[in-house]
Image (cartoon, rainbow, N blue to C red):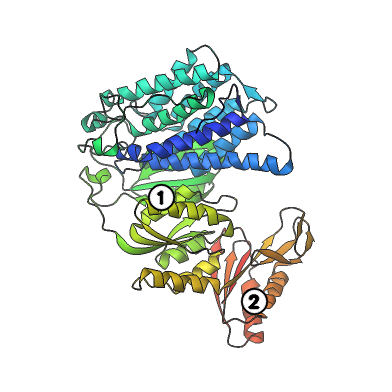
C-alpha cells in the first residue's frame, strides 16, 4: 500500500519505517529462515528478525497512542526513536535479532541526542547509520566478516559517501548493503558451500529497503539470496547442501558447537556487565550483549546453561530467561542433517504472567509464553510458541482480556500454516488453570475445547493490585498506593491493606457460591495473606477447598479464582 514519502527523519518517519520493515521481514521471513546456515542452521533467523521488529513497531505505536489519548499531538523524534530501540531490546530474539536491536539502539542514540529536535536530515541519518554499525560491532564478542556486521558496516560506509537528503542517503546505504550481502559467500566458506548469502545480512537489507521506501515511496529492487544470482529465490530454490557452522561471533567455521542458546534481559550496571561479558566469553561462544542505561539483552551459546544464568544473577537481575536446547544429533552439535521430530497430536499454548505459573503450566504439559508486567507478548511470539509446541492441534490460552486480538491474529497465522488452532478467550491465568485441569488430549478436539471453555467460563477471577496513579474507577477515585480489588476486570474494592482488601474481594466472590478457591501469590504478597484467606474459607464456607500457588513476578499482588 502506497504512503506519502517522508522528507525528514521525524517521529512519523520512525513509525513508517518500523511498519514497512515489519511488513518486509514478514514477506521475507520464510526465505530468510530457509537460507539460515550460519551461525546455526536452525532455520529461525527470519523469524527472530521479524519478532524483534514487531516489538520495536509495537513500542513506537504505543508512544503515538499515548500522545493521541492525551491530545498532545505527534511525539518528538527522540521519544519515537527511544521507543523503537527499547522495543527492539526487550523483544530481541536470537543472535540476529539481538544484533538488529543494537543497530536500532545505535541509530536512536544519534536521533535522540537532542530531545528538542523535531527532525533530522540526511547528515543526521548518515551519522545514525555509522554509529549503529560501530555499536553493533562493539556488542559482539568476536566479530566475523561475511555476516550482518559486514553488511551494516558497508551500509554505513556507502551512506557516509552520499550527499543529499534522507532519501538519497537511505538509497546509498541500501545499495552498499546489497552489494556487501552479495559478497558474503566469498567471505564465509559455509555460505559458499551452501550457495547462499548470509541470512542476517539479508534481513538487514530488507530493513534498509524499508528505510528507502519510507523516504522515497518506492520499494527497492529484489535482493539475491542464492550465491551468484540476482533474481530473488524462494525457499525451494535454496541449496540443500547447507551444513552447520559455529556462531556468527566465532573466530572461524567448524563442525561443533555448544548445546544451548541462552537469552535473557538483565537489569545491571555497566561495571557488572563488563565482568559478565568476560565470564560468558569463557563459557561459550556467539556472545552478544546489547543495551545500556541499566537494561541489557544477553545472548550466548553454551554447554552449561545454568552457569550462564548464574552469571547473570551475579551481575544483576535477569528475567525473561529463554533456554533452547539445540539437541542431540542437531546440526549445530554434529554438522549432520537434522531428523524431523514427529508432531504431537495436540498441545496447549498459554500466556502466563509469572515464572511460578510458567513452571506450573509447564508441569501440566503446556507450552508457555511469559508476559512480564507492562511487556505483553506480540502476535509473532505467540505464533512462535505454537510452532514450538509442534502439534497438529493447539489450544491457545491468552489468559488476559487485552490479548484477545493479539491471540486471534496469532491463531489465524498458525491456521494459515496448516495447524488447527482453537482460541479459548481466558481473561486470567486462574481461568487458564481451570481449563488446563480438564484438558484431555485423548478426547476429540472439539469436545476437549468445549470442556476447557466451559471450565474457564465457570471460573470467576479477581486480582489484588496496588494503584500506580490517581484515577477514577467503578468503585470511586483511587490514589497512588491504594490497594485495588478487581473482580472480573472491574475495580470493586479500594482499600489500604492487602489482606483486608483480599478478604473483602473473596467474600464477595463466594457470596454467589463456589467449590474451589485458587490463590496465586505474587512476590510482593504479604507472607500471612494465604494462611489468612485459607482460614477464612475453611471457617466461613463449608465444602469449599483452597489451593495456593506461587506466581513469582506477576504484576498483581494476588490472583484469585473461584470455581
Looking at the picture, tell me which residue is in the foreground, 387 or 326.
387
Q: Position of residue 306 (x, y in %)?
A: 40, 52
- Res 407 label: none
- Quarter where residue 239 is shown: top left
User: Label 2: few (<14), some or many (≥20) within 10 Å?
Assistant: many
SS label for mark 2? helix
Residue drawn at (63%, 40%), measured in percent from left and top?
A: 63
Element on which disc 1 rests: helix
Mark 2 vs mark 1: which is more N-terminal? 1
Locate residue 88, reporting x and y percent: 51, 39
The residue at the point 39 percent across, 54 percent down is: 415
Disc 1 packing (10 Å; few <14; some 14–19; many ≥20): some
Q: CA distance from mark 2 to mark 1?
A: 39 Å
- Is there any visible trace of residue 288 in the rendered image? no
Residue 492 on image: x %, y % = 72, 67
In the picture, the quarter occupied by the C terminus is bottom right
Residue 91 is situated, as x and y percent measured from the top left of the image, at: 50, 44
Query: Which residue has dot 2 on it?
Result: 533
Residue at 27% over, 26% down: 185
**Residue 143 vs residue 535: left or right?**
left
Q: Farthest front residue?
A: 1
Label 2 vs label 1, nearer the camera: 2
**Image quadrant in which you'd find residue 393:** bottom left
Residue that mark 1 sits on: 307
Up/down of 496 relative to 252, above or below: below
Task: Report whether residue 352 is seen.
Answer: yes
268 shown above or below 125: below
Q: Nearer the viewer, residue 471 or 132?
A: 471
How many numbered marks have been drawn onto this rendered protein structure?
2
Amino acid at each position: 500500500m502506497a504512503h506519502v514519502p517522508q522528507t525528514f527523519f521525524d517521529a512519523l518517519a520512525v513509525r513508517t519505517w518500523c511498519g514497512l520493515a515489519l511488513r518486509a521481514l514478514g514477506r521475507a521471513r520464510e526465505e530468510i529462515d530457509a537460507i539460515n546456515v550460519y551461525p546455526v542452521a536452525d532455520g529461525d533467523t527470519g523469524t527472530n528478525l521479524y519478532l524483534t521488529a514487531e516489538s520495536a513497531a509495537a513500542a513506537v505505536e504505543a508512544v503515538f497512542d499515548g500522545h493521541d489519548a492525551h491530545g498532545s499531538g505527534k511525539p518528538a523524534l527522540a521519544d519515537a526513536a527511544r521507543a523503537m530501540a527499547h522495543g527492539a531490546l526487550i523483544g530481541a530474539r536470537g543472535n540476529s535479532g539481538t544484533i538488529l536491536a543494537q543497530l536500532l539502539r545505535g541509530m536512536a542514540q544519534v536521533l535522540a541526542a537532542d530531545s528538542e529536535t523535531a527532525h533530522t536530515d540526511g547528515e543526521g541519518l548518515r551519522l545514525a547509520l555509522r554509529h549503529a554499525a560501530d555499536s553493533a560491532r562493539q556488542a559482539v564478542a568476536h566479530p566475523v566478516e561475511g555476516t550482518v556486521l559486514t553488511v551494516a558496516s558497508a551500509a554505513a560506509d556507502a551512506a557516509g559517501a552520499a550527499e543529499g537528503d534522507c532519501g538519497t542517503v537511505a538509497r546509498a546505504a541500501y545499495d552498499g548493503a546489497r552489494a556487501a550481502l552479495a559478497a558474503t559467500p566469498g567471505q564465509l566458506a559455509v555460505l559458499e558451500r551452501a550457495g547462499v548469502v548470509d541470512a542476517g545480512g539479508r534481513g538487514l537489507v530488507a530493513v534498509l529497503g524499508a528505510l528507502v521506501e519510507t523516504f522515497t515511496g518506492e520499494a527497492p529492487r529484489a535482493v539475491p539470496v542464492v550465491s551468484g544470482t540476482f533474481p530473488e529465490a524462494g525457499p525451494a530454490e535454496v541449496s540443500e547442501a547447507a551444513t552447520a557452522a559455529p556462531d556468527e561471533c566465532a573466530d572461524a567455521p567448524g563442525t561443533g558447537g555448544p548445546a544451548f542458546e541462552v537469552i535473557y534481559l538483565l537489569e545491571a550496571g555497566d561495571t557488572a556487565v563488563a565482568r559478565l561479558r568476560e565470564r560468558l566469553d569463557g563459557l561459550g561462544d556467539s556472545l552478544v550483549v546489547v543495551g545500556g542505561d541499566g537494561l541489557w539483552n544477553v545472548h550466548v551459546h553454551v554447554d552449561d546453561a545454568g552457569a550462564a544464568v548464574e552469571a547473570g544473577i551475579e551481575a544483576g537481575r535477569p528475567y525473561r530467561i529463554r533456554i533452547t536446547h539445540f539437541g542431540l544429533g542437531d546440526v549445530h552439535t554434529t554438522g549432520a542433517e537434522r531428523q524431523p521430530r514427529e508432531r504431537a497430536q495436540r498441545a496447549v499454548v498459554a500466556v502466563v504472567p509469572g515464572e511460578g505459573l510458567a513452571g506450573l503450566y509447564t508441569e501440566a504439559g503446556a507450552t508457555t509464553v511469559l508476559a512480564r508486567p507492562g511487556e505483553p507478548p506480540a502476535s509473532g511470539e505467540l505464533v512462535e510458541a505454537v510452532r514450538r509446541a509442534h502439534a497438529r492441534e493447539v489450544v491457545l490460552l491468552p489468559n488476559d482480556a487485552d490479548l484477545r486480538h493479539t491471540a486471534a491474529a496469532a491463531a489465524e497465522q498458525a491456521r494459515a500454516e496448516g495447524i488447527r488452532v482453537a482460541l479459548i478467550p481466558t481473561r486470567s491465568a486462574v481461568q487458564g488453570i481451570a481449563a488446563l485441569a480438564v484438558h484431555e488430549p485423548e478426547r476429540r478436539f472439539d469436545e476437549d475445547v468445549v470442556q476447557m471453555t466451559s471450565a474457564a467460563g465457570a471460573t470467576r477471577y479477581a486480582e489484588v493490585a496496588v494503584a500506580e496513579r490517581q484515577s477514577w474507577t467503578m468503585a470511586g477515585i483511587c490514589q497512588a498506593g491504594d490497594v485495588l480489588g478487581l473482580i472480573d476486570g472491574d475495580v470493586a474494592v479500594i482499600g489500604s491493606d492487602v489482606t483486608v482488601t483480599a478478604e473483602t474481594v473473596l467474600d464477595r466472590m463466594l457470596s454467589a457460591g463456589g467449590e474451589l478457591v485458587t490463590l496465586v501469590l505474587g512476590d510482593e504478597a504479604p507472607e500471612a495473606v494465604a494462611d489468612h484467606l485459607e482460614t477464612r474459607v475453611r471457617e466461613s464456607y463449608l465444602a469449599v477447598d483452597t489451593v495456593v500457588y506461587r506466581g513469582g513476578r506477576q504484576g498483581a499482588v494476588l490472583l484469585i479464582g473461584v470455581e
